[in-house]
C-alpha cells in the first residue's frame, strides 16, 4: 500500500517513578525489578489519557492541516461510552472529524496503522491521525511486582497520508495471528460483562493487570518467530534487508528476544529502560524516538512488530 | 470498493422481557414505555456475550471456510484485556486467526464493515467476519426508564469478501462525522480512567447507561440530515435510488425520523419493537432480518446508516 508516515509524535508525563521507589511499594528490591523487567524508570500520568493523547498528537500534526480521521488505538479507555477517540478529539479542540477506536491491547497502534493504510488506499480518507495513549498505571497490582514494575504511562502518534507521487514510501507486507489459547497469560478481567463493576462478585483485583511473564514469553517467542518467517516470505525479503526494527517495548527480556530472532542490537529501538511498557503507546513512542534521532530515512526498510494480550503477534514491513 | 456481503447472521436470546414486565421494575407504565421508546419486547442474554457472538457468526459462516480476520465491532467488552474478539474466536473454536476490536458505540458494526471493505480491497485479507454482540442489559439504570427500556441484547454478523469477478456488489460511498460537543448526551462514565472501578469516588450509577433522549434526537436529526446530503453527493445519487434502508434501531422515534429524512416506510427495516436498541448489534441484526425476508437482492442500492454516542453519525451506500 502506497502510504507514508508523514510525521510522528510523543508525550511522556514529567512525573517519574524509579525502580528504587517502586521496590518499596512492591515489597521487593530495585535489583529484582531491573532483572525481571529491565525497567529503571517509568513515567506516570498526573493529568488525563486524553491530555496525553492530545500532546502527542499535536507534535505529530505540527502546523499541518487537521486530520480527516482520528483513530484512537489504545487499551486504556477514558470511559465505556463514548469511545476514547471522542475525548481525544475534544482535547485537540476539533469538532466534526470522524473518529473511532481500535483495541488490540499492545498491538492497537500497529493494527491501527495497518487499517489506516487500507482506509487511505481506498480513498475514504486523505490524512489519518493514529494516536495511542495509555494510563496503565491505574491498573497496576502492587502485589504482583513483575507486571506492576513493567507498566509506564505515555502517548505516541503518527500522521499517515498517501505517498506523494514521487515518493517510495510503502507498507510492503503485513502479518498477524491471534491465539485465544494464550488469553489467560495477560488479562484484566474486569470492566466488562465477566466482572461488571457493580456485580457483588467483582473484587478489586479483577480490575488490575495480571501477567504470567514466563507463559507469555514462551508462547510469544514461538509465535513471533513463525510470524516473522511468514512476513518475510510474503515480502520476498530477508531479515538482513531491515535497517531498523521498532518493536513493542514489552520488557527487557522481550527486547533481548528480538536480537535472538535475528536482528543486530544496533538496529533495534529500545526505550523500555526509561519508559517501561506503555501498552499500545510503546510502539509509536519508540517510532518517534527513532524519528527524532534521525534514524528513520526515507527509503529504508523498517520492521514494526510486537506482541499483545490475546495472545496476538503482528508485524509490518515498511519502506519508510 | 468492490466488496460483497456474502452472508449475514443473527442471534437473539430466548428470554424476553415485555414492556409490561419492565414497567413494574422502572416504576412506570407499559403505555409510557411504548410511547417513549417504541419497544414492546427486548431479548435478554442469559449466557455470555461471546456465546451470542459465536451463535450469530455461525449462521453467517454456514458451511463456508473460516474467516482470515475476525473483527469484533461492539461496545460491550467481555473484559478489559484481551479485547473481546479473542473470546469470540475462542467461542467459535478457532485458533490463530488474527482478530481485534473496533469501538464506535452503536456505529461499531458499520465502521467495521467499512474498515473491513478497505482491508479486503488492500488484499491483506480475503474473508472477514464482522461480528457485533451486545449485552447492554447489564448496564441498565432502572431509575432512568427511557434508556433502561430501550436496551436489548443480541448479536449480528456478516461475512465480507471481495466481489466475485462478474458480480456488481460494491461499497459506493461512505460518510461519517463525530461531534464531541454531543458526548454528554449518551454515556457510561465508568470502566475507564475517569471512574476506575476501584476508585473510592466511583459510584454504581457511573457504570450504568445514561441518555438524554431529547438532546440526542435533536442533535442526531440535524447531523444525520447533513451526513445524508454529503453521502448522496459523494455517490452522485438520490434518496429515490435507494431500494432499502437498514438503519440503526435507535428507538421508535429514531426510526420515524428516518421517514422524515426522505425514505418511504416500506423501504425501512424496523425491528426495534421486538428487539429494542441492541447497540452495535442492531444494524447487523436488522440486516440479517432483511436478508432472511428476501428483501436484499443483488444489484439493489442499500443504505446502511446510524447514529452513536460521540455524537457520531455515519452512512454507507452499498450496491448489494
Image (spheres, coloured by chain):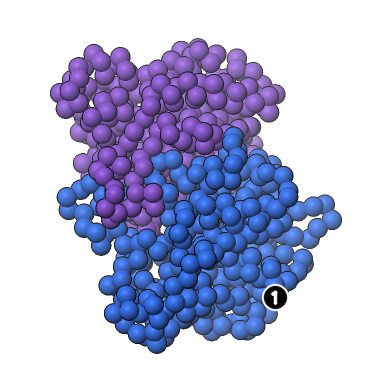
Chain colours: A blue, B purple
If the image is split into quadrants, where does the C terminus of chain A sit?
Answer: bottom right
Residue B89 appears in the rendering: no
Image height check: is A313 above or below A3?
A: below
Query: Residue at image x 82%, y 52%?
Result: A165
Left or right: residue A220 versus residue B232 is left
Query: What is the x, y in percent for residue B171?
Result: 60, 35
Residue A15 on image: x %, y %: 48, 67
The answer to which of A308 and A50 lies nearer the viewer is: A50
Estimate the x, y position of residue A120 in percent, counting from the top left: 67, 47
Which residue is located at x 50 percent, y 24 percent?
B219
- The residue shown at (48%, 14%) is B259
Of B65 and B172, which appears nearest the observer? Answer: B172
Residue at mark 1: A243
* Residue A91: quarter of image: top right
- Considering the image in quadrants, where does the N terminus of chain A appear? bottom right
Q: Is residue A287 left or right of residue A297?
A: left
Q: Residues within 10 Å of mark 1 (few under 14, many from 20)?
A: many
Residue at x 20%, y 33% (from the top left corner): B15
Given the image, what chain letter belongs to the residue carrying mark 1? A
x and y percentages locating residue A157 in the rendered image = 60, 57
Is A238 left or right of A183, judged from the image as shown? right
Q: How many numbered discs, if any?
A: 1
Amino acid at each position: 500500500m502506497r502510504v507514508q508516515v508523514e510525521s510522528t509524535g510523543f508525550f511522556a508525563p514529567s512525573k517519574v517513578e524509579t525502580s528504587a521507589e517502586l521496590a518499596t511499594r512492591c515489597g521487593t528490591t530495585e535489583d529484582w525489578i531491573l532483572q525481571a523487567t529491565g525497567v529503571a524508570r517509568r513515567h506516570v500520568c498526573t493529568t488525563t489519557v486524553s491530555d496525553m493523547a492530545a500532546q502527542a498528537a499535536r507534535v505529530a500534526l505540527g502546523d499541518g492541516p487537521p486530520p480527516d480521521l482520528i483513530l484512537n488505538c489504545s487499551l486504556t479507555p477514558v470511559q465505556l461510552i463514548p469511545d476514547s477517540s471522542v475525548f481525544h478529539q475534544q482535547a485537540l479542540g476539533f469538532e466534526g472529524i470522524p473518529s473511532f477506536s481500535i483495541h488490540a491491547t499492545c498491538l492497537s497502534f500497529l493494527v491501527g496503522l495497518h487499517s489506516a493504510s487500507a482506509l487511505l488506499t481506498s480513498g475514504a480518507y486523505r490524512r489519518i491521525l493514529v494516536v495511542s495513549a495509555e494510563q496503565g498505571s491505574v491498573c497496576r497490582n502492587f502485589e504482583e511486582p513483575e507486571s506492576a514494575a513493567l507498566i509506564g504511562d505515555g502517548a505516541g502518534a503518527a500522521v499517515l497520508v498517501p505517498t506523494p507521487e514521487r515518493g517510495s514510501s510503502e507498507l510492503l507486507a503485513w502479518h498477524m495471528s491471534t491465539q485465544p489459547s494464550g488469553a489467560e497469560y495477560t488479562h484484566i478481567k474486569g470492566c466488562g460483562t465477566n466482572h461488571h463493576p457493580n456485580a457483588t462478585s467483582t473484587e478489586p483485583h479483577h480490575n488490575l493487570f495480571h501477567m504470567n511473564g514466563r507463559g507469555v514469553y514462551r508462547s510469544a517467542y514461538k509465535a513471533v518467530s513463525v510470524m516473522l518467517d511468514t512476513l518475510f516470505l510474503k515480502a520476498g525479503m530477508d531479515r538482513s534487508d531491515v535497517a531498523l526494527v521498532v518493536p513493542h517495548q514489552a520488557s527487557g527480556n522481550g527486547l533481548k528476544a528480538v536480537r535472538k530472532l535475528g536482528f543486530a542490537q544496533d538496529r533495534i529501538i529500545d526505550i523500555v529502560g526509561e519508559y517501561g511498557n506503555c501498552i499500545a503507546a510503546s510502539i509509536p513512542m519508540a517510532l518517534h524516538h527513532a524519528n527524532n534521532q534521525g534514524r528513520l530515512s526515507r527509503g529504508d526498510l523498517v520492521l514494526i512488530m510486537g506482541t499483545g494480550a490475546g495472545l496476538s503477534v503482528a508485524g509490518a514491513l515498511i519502506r519508510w
